[in-house]
Image: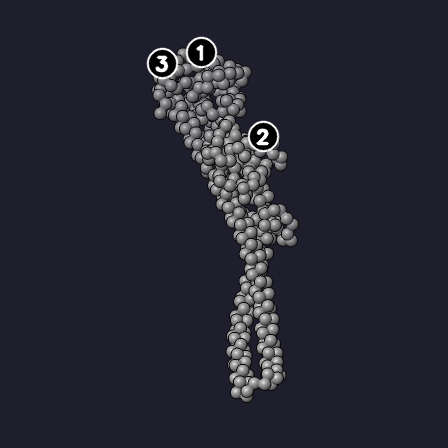
Amino acid sequence: MVKHMDIKVLLIDDDNFIHKVVRKAADGVFSVCHAYNGPEGFEIAKSEQPDVILLDVEMPGQNGYECCEVLKSDNTTKEIPIVFLSGKTTLRERMLGYEAGADDYQLKPFDTVELIAKLKVSAKYKTERDSLKTEIKTAHNTAMDVMTGNSELGLVMRFVEMTYGIRQLDSLAKQLLELTSSLDLKCSVLFDFNGKAFTYCSSGLLSPIEQELLESCRTNKRFIDFGCRTIINYPKVTLLVKNMPLDSPEKYGRFKDVLPTVLGATDAKLRLMETNDLLLKQGEKTHFAFTNIRHSLQDLVKSLHVHQADAGESIERLAKSMQFELPKLALEPDQEEFILDSITNTFDEVSEHLSNSNEVNITFVHILKEMKSLVGDLENVISATQQDICFMQGAEVDIDDEDGYQMDVELF
């Protein structure tokens, strides 16, 4: 509430008697500034900024209506309440005063008690209006901050969504720098991919000192602030912001909250891309090993077939040779029969062993079929992963969009 002596009244009237009456009535209640014509009153109103203006309607030269219009047209005085003093109280007079911008009307001659009451009401009205404007401005600023924060959150959510389909380092850097640019931030970024540093800059060219700065600070603490520059470190990504808004603590704080979320998602994406790359290399090694084993088994089966055939032929030659040569040895019939029976029994045993070897051959063939299927599966996995690696390295691949990923939901 406005205290009485805190109220400042500007009286604009060409009548000295009115000035004396108002001065006496205001003594101990509120302070009074005096002006005796419109132009003088306008200048005093701009310099003193009174709480209420008491304005005579009938003055020589610039009358009260004209003076009121001048006061209401100036940005420095248009919010000051104006109470007209006039000996005329017709509806037309009041309408003219309202049209000129007056807030109240006081008839001459007036009762000082009534005048003081009206001045107090006008001063209170101004105070409450100023307070309401302040609250509205505060609410507007708060709403704008919330809307700005939601907009920034929407950008972050969209970036996180986009990372799901990104498979190129260049595309990941492009999306990250586009996000920071939409926040009016000038940035450079370093990716640690498989122990190698890949750097990118929003301006397109990274200066040698920025390159050195990013590499030297990548293993330092999470936040490094120096002037309007801030470095934010994650295990796989380091971001240099070159124009943090030091003149806006609210925006500065929001960026300190938003950017770690963005870099956390980027760091996770880089780790996933490294895992895919590692899986490809391991798959290639496994494919190479399986292929060599398969070829070795094939050679072994062929060699086994050859040895089986050679063994059978050798036994047959031996049997025929013995049948032809034994009669020349002049052996007794029973001796000759014994030798032939022994050879025949041995031949039968060897034949049985060779038959068992065929079972081994069948097992080898089954193993080879299984390995062939595994090698085919590995080839498919490697082919798909190689396509991803081509994307990571920026190679040309025939797809519709840059990353093979499209969003059909627009956030904020």
Q: Which numbered mark, 2 or 3, is in the foreground of this view?
A: 2
Frontmost residue, 301 versus 273: 301
Q: CA distance from mark 1 to mark 3?
A: 17 Å
In the image, residue 359 lies at what x, y percent?
52, 73
Q: Residue at x 48, y 16 (%)?
A: 47
Q: Give the residue number, with chain letter if any, for mark 1.
A: 16
Vertical side of 220 occupied by 24: above or below: above
Tag 1 or tag 2, which sits nearer the N-term?
Answer: 1
Residue at 60 percent across and 53 percent down: it is 387
In this orientation, does residue 15 appear? yes
Give the camera-side residue of 297 and 44: 297
Of residues 10 and 49, which is closer to you in this image? 49
Q: Secondary structure at mark 2?
A: helix
Mark 2–mark 1 Cα distance, whole angstroms, equals 77 Å
Label of residue 209 in the image:
2
Relative to 242, does residue 74 appear above or below in the rendering? above
Amino acid type of the residue that numbered disc 2 sits on in the rendered structure:
Ile
Say whether residue 90 is left or right of residue 201: left
**Residue 216: % across, % down:** 53, 32
Gap in angstroms between the C-alphas marked 2 and 3: 72 Å
Q: What residue lies at 56% left-to-right and 57% top-to-bottom?
A: 289
Label 1 close to label 3 by CB (< 8 Å): no
Amino acid type for the residue under numbered disc 1: Asn
Measuring from the top left, give residue 65's x and y in whole percent. Answer: 51, 22
Q: Nearer the viewer, residue 107 or 297?
A: 297
Amino acid at the residue labelled 3: Asp
Q: Is residue 154 visible?
A: no
Pointer 3: what residue? 27
